[in-house]
Image: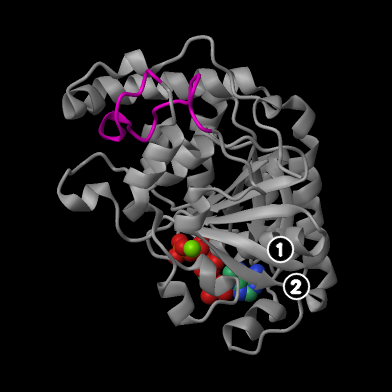
């Protein structure tokens, strides 16, 4: 289950992503955490020290390795250089599983110890291809997108992505890569305006979207959110002393998180899990191809000098059976 946390800057995306990741780990659900923000904060929210957080490998710096591994023996992708962030997998491509060991995790993932066991954490990092002067391909999250597009995840297997608030994800199609998007909104007009924008994009592509109210202090706050987003409002999270204590460096065991917040996290889990039976890998592939062709036309073909439409394998569909989970 691929889960994104999005929302206005400062709304609490990183905080709620980290709490949800901790919740999944504590309930014994397999989870990989992904920080897709170039200003890395997820590691710290998961309890890493500043130094540990800064020492996380950057996925953006390992793009050649990631591309070479994923394209495998796919004859339609002739080199890593012609593989762009939207290049879809096809026959011969290497698919990824959450629990396996592979060169991508070895290069890009680090284990973070949480109550409930260690969790793999990956980060986009501050460095990407576009920093090399190949401007304007806004591929800050290109490595994450490639990862998601080659990932075969099953039930009780979660990838939780802490996303930037920018519009990158609309252009590349990244926002269609998730089984569930949790939009974090404070009860303010600005919080709601990001919701409206996201909702518009999401509607056109059938992207499941739910609102998680954050820093909700009163009935009036709750009423405001409900009026603005209606039934899209899933739960509301209040101010958390547990979070505050952690920010002061006085972290407490996760079991001591406020009961109401803990129940809210379980609701997020149940809501995401309920989508599992409706997952549609064919639609997933279709949208992947749609955005690949769009990116190919708008910049990819010119940039790589080849016709990137030829990378599409028309008969290929990702499915769980395509890559069994190692035992
Ligand atoms: N429910 C909460 N209880 C207490 N503090 C909170 C809560 N939610 C968020 N915060 C605090 O608010 C601040 C902003 O939260 P956070 O960093 O998670 O937001 P963000 O959306 O990830 O921001 P950015 O857009 O900068 O990435 C942090 O100091 C965080 O600890
Ligand atoms: Mg953040």
Q: Is residue 262 above or below residue 197?
A: below
- Res 210 → quadrant: top right
Q: Residue under circle 2? A: 115
Give the x, y percent position of residue 270.
81, 46
Q: Nearer the viewer, residue 113 or 274?
A: 113
In the image, residue 92 lies in the stretch drawn in magenta: yes
Quadrant housing the C terminus: top right
Give the x, y percent position of residue 263.
83, 61
Identify the residue at image location x=66%, y=56%.
213
Q: Quadrant of ligand 1?
A: bottom right
In the image, residue 277 lies in the stretch drawn in magenta: no
Q: Is residue 305 above or below residue 253?
A: above
Range drawn in magenta: 75-94
- Res 32 → quadrant: bottom right
Res 189 seen here: no
Q: Residue under circle 1? A: 237
Quadrant housing the N terminus: top right
């Amino acid at each position: 289950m691929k889960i994104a946390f999005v929302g206005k800057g400062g709304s609490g995306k990183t905080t709620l992503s980290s709490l949800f990741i901790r919740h999944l780990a504590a309930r014994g659900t397999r989870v990989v955490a992904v920080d897709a923000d170039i200003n890395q904060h997820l590691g710290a929210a998961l309890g890493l020290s500043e130094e540990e957080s800064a020492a996380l490998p950057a996925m953006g710096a390992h793009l050649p390795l990631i591309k070479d591994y994923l394209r495998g023996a796919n004859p339609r992708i002739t080199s890593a250089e012609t593989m762009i962030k939207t290049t879809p997998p096809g026959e011969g491509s290497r698919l990824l599983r959450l629990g396996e060991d592979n060169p991508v995790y070895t290069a890009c993932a680090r284990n973070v110890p949480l109550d409930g066991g260690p969790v793999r954490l990956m980060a986009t990092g501050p460095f990407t291809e576009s920093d090399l002067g190949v401007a304007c391909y806004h591929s800050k999250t290109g490595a994450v997108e490639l990862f998601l597009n080659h990932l075969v995840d099953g039930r009780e297997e979660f990838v939780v992505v802490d996303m930037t608030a920018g519009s990158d994800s609309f252009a590349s199609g990244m926002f269609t890569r998730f089984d569930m998007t949790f939009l974090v909104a404070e009860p303010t007009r600005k919080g709601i305006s990001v919701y409206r924008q996201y909702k518009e994009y999401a509607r056109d592509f059938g992207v499941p979207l739910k609102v998680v109210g954050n820093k909700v202090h009163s009935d009036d706050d709750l009423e405001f959110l409900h009026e603005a987003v209606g039934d899209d409002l899933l739960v509301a999270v209040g101010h958390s002393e547990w979070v505050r204590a952690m920010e002061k460096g006085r972290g407490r065991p996760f079991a001591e998180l406020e009961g109401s917040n803990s129940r809210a996290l379980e609701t997020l889990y149940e809501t995401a899990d309920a989508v599992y039976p409706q997952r549609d890998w064919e639609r997933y592939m279709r949208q992947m191809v749609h955005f690949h062709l769009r990116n190919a036309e708008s910049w990819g073909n010119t940039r790589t000098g080849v016709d990137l439409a030829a990378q599409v394998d028309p008969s290929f569909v990702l499915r769980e059976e395509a890559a069994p989970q190692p035992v």
